[in-house]
Amino acid sequence: MCRAARAPKPTTYQVSRIARSRRSTAARLEKAPGYVRLRTRPRGAALRVLGLLVVFLVTLTAGFWVGLAPAILLPGWFGAVRSLIGLVGTAVGIAGGIWLGAAISHLLTDAARWAAASWVAGRPAPGGRFFARRREHGERWRNALDVGLMFLCVALIGWGPGVGITSLVHGLRDASLVAQLRADGAPVPGKLIDVPQYSDDDNGNVTEDDVATLSFSGLQVTDPSIGGRPLPLDADDPAATDVPVTVVYLRGDPFVAAAKQQITGSVWHGAPTANLISGGLFTLALPALVLYLVLRVRRRRWRQAKGFVADPAE
């Protein structure tokens, strides 16, 4: 208060004297007859907060799983776009859960007030006075939508040009490897096994990674990721994987090898093609989304400038 009023700072003696005067004044005050302490919180406030927590927990959980369900239900060959659908769906589901929880809490509060007013009046109260539409949070939702659109632009950059170019480069590399093995490869019997690799971080924590490996003719070669993934290991016990396969390797370089089923058919089948299609579509949608976001931000700034100019004129 002294700083705001530009007054000198009070000394320790003045502060202690004011405190002693207040204590002496409070000691002389006595409670009047019929003294009742006013309630600072309404009855049932704790139950109301607990009920709101339960409502929001239920709506958030439901929104999370509803948003994540499309990514879970899509097949694996759908490509990396499943991750984008999962992220966007989860964010939209959580936002929808928050909105639904707020709507339910407002509805329950309005219903309780309407029921109390009807009980006091002895007849049903007019619902329009209690169940009116709330508009005071419109600006917050617009800000949240703007932030969501900016994050969506960043996601489209990663899943559009990023996934598309990466899938194209990996597809061309896989096609070249498959063509080379088909032309100059020699088939031999082998096995698919798990050779774990260990790595440690700066804190000394050791991490074990299961690596699909082809074992043939006394050699062990890491199984190449053709078509987006290597051969699958045993899901229950990867270390116990011991699957007989036919290995095709280059005579001049036996460390270039792959399983026969990996070089059968097109390397573009499944996820690589889905990644190229989704990457192309997201790349085409990116300029339109950026333009819409720019126009939206400019429109909001124009409205703020218009209101700032209109206020002095009034």
Image: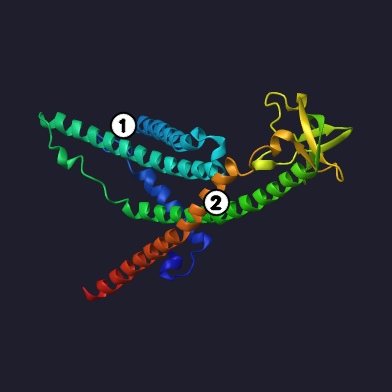
Q: Residue at x 39, y 64 (%)?
A: 297
Nearer to us in this view, 67 or 147? 67
Q: Quadrant of residue 197?
A: top right
Q: Residue furthest front?
A: 183
Q: Nearer the viewer, mark 1 or mark 2?
A: 2
- In the rendered image, the vertical position of residue 48 relative to residue 174, given as above or below: above
Q: Position of residue 232 (x, y in %)?
A: 69, 31
Q: Quick check: 291 left or right of 12?
A: left
Query: In this view, which residue lies farthest toward the right?
Result: 218
- Mark 2 secondary-structure assignment: helix
Per the image, the residue denoted by label 2 is 159
- Relative side of 265 to 151, left or right: right
Which quadrant would the C terminus be assigned to in this image? bottom left
Three-letter code, disc 1? Arg
Q: Is residue 208 visible?
A: no
Q: What residue does disc 1 label? A: 43
Taking depth in this image into account, of 298 and 78 the one nearest to the observer is 78
Q: Residue at x 44, y 66 (%)?
A: 2
